[in-house]
Image: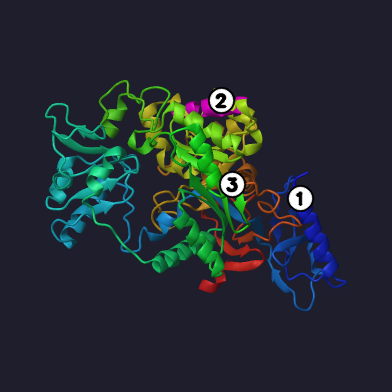
Amino acid sequence: MPKQFFLNVIFLAVVLASCTDSYDADTILFNGKVITVDKDFTIAEAVAIKGDRVIRVGSSVEIRKLSGPNTKKIDLHGKTVLPGLIDAHLHPLMAAVSELSEEIPDVHTLRELLEYIKQQAEEKEKGEWIIHPKFFPTRIKEMRQPTKDELDLVAPDHPVFLNGSYGGMINSCALRNSGIDRNTKHPGILKDPETGEPNGILRSSAFKLIKKTMPVRTISYEQELDALEKMIRRYNQVGLTGITDATQTTQAGIRKYLDLKNQNRLPIRINLTVRTPDYESREQFLDELINMGFYSPFGDEWVKICQLKTSIDGGILTGTAYLRQPWGLKAKEIYGIDDPGYRGILIISKDELFGKVSAANETGWKMTAHVTGGGGVDLFLDAYENANREASIKEKRHSIIHGNFFTRDAIDRCAAMGIISDMQPAWFYKDADAMKYILGEERIKTFLPARSMIEKGMILNGGSDHMVKFDSYSSTNPYNPFLGMWVLITRTTERGTVICADEAISRKEALKMYTINNAYGTFDEEIKGSIEPGKLADMIVISTDYLTCPVDSIRYIQVEQTILGGDIVYSFYDKI
């Protein structure tokens, strides 16, 4: 049995032995509905906490017997308790500073975007950059990039940059500032096929040409630390007690979390992702992994390094994801792609990918990668199968970040090797309509087919990919976990359409994705992810019964209290 199981048993025995005859608990929650998410999905009425651990779950009568004169008693009055929720994939360091200087608009139409740019042009000095840090054309009503002429009309004297992560759009002023013209030779600069002039559409490989002329925002370390703490407390408000920072975290990033922890300002449990080191040979790569000074997993229950990450392709929102078949005719009107055989881009070679996965597996690291297209998924699975021939990978809990497009064959391959899908339901919510329009009826059936994946035995992790904006619903990638669960349960998009309803999953399955499944993905299932004796006392009290409320109410569930290690780190009532 796992080592942590025995540690939990020992902990529970020590706690009970050190208590008074009545086993006085520090805190009890009673008279409620406790959805434990244990292996039997047990429903209880009450829970007792001692220190930072759960010591008993049961009926209100049983649990109240554990209270003493100093026990904090929380009468739930019938409210529902869930395990603390976990987000398997977000970018807190980026999100924390994204709206420090000004609010980023949540635009839904081309007109709203152009009006925003025009307003910025009126407020800024001539020559100042106007930047939207995360704009995706597939997410506006018209589902297209603005043209260079449209940007020039509203901002003729200001360089404009619409950053879509793996692609973007700039206007004529930005082209001039960056020294880009028809003679500039770069594969990331798209040009008008008739005139040969740059049309303003860029691939991410060309971003370095424009960023050299863009302003650099500088804020102090303490400002960054304060912003990060505030962002984490926003996560607490939606029930998050654990997150995985999916950024390829540097030592400086790790330091921020450790500093918050050491200053008692870290009200959440952090799992970190680190970038696969650069190398020229397999031997050098193995040396680099060893010289990092840590391994997978490394750390404690507060801050832990969990996985190595690389990148395979671009993104579905900019037409740079590497697909199994060409993007098709619609790709021209959406992304400006003229090549009928274009399948997307690969940003890593097959040999390099195989080498990284093999070396990571050999040294015991959990491996993952950003990959958004089906062709990229298949290539990654090839690399996993290659590593598996050398040494078993199943116990490593390797994963695929995003993935998006899983055929039946890909699902079978994942299940056979124990590959976890690090899935973002918010992408389905925001992007499934556009993907159906671009890719057609058949290919959309492979877009996040959660039901098929679960039926084949795959473990699905739930995350948001939150990067920009503070609000849990209007962020570029919404991070409210109840919205994510609702999307998985209903297969409903932001535009109100239901796509591939047969791939919907149950409420229990969706909840597991944000609790015990995510704990499993970070090797933490013995200490969190469910409400059980010996586990960390991470739990939330919510406004309605998740299992029985009307399905459309799920997306709007409010968190009333967030409890982390037995301490209340967020209370709705403190705001009243």
Display colour scheme: rainbow
Residue 270 percent location from the top left of the image: 55, 55
Q: Amino acid at mark 3?
A: Tyr
Q: Which residue is mark 3?
A: 295
> Which is nearer the eye, 102 or 257?
257
Magenta segment: 374-389
Q: Which residue is mark 2?
A: 386
Residue 256 lies left or right of residue 566; in this view the side is left
Residue 320 lies left or right of residue 266; in this view the side is left
Q: Earlier along the polypeptide chain: callout 2 or callout 1?
A: 1
Q: Is residue 446 magenta?
A: no
State the separation of the CA atoms marked 2 and 1: 33 Å
The answer to whether mark 2 and mark 3 are in CB contact below 8 A is no
**Of helix, strand and loop, which one carries label 3?**
loop
State the separation of the CA atoms marked 2 and 3: 22 Å
Q: Residue at x 32, y 46 (%)?
A: 135
Q: Earlier along the polypeptide chain: callout 3 or callout 1?
A: 1
Residue 309 percent location from the top left of the image: 49, 41
> Which is nearer the eye, 224 or 354?
354
> Which is nearer the eye, 42 or 221?
221
**Of helix, strand and loop, which one carries label 1?**
helix
Give the crowd class for mark 3: few <14, some 14-19, many >=20 residues within 10 Å: some
Q: Which residue is mark 1?
A: 5
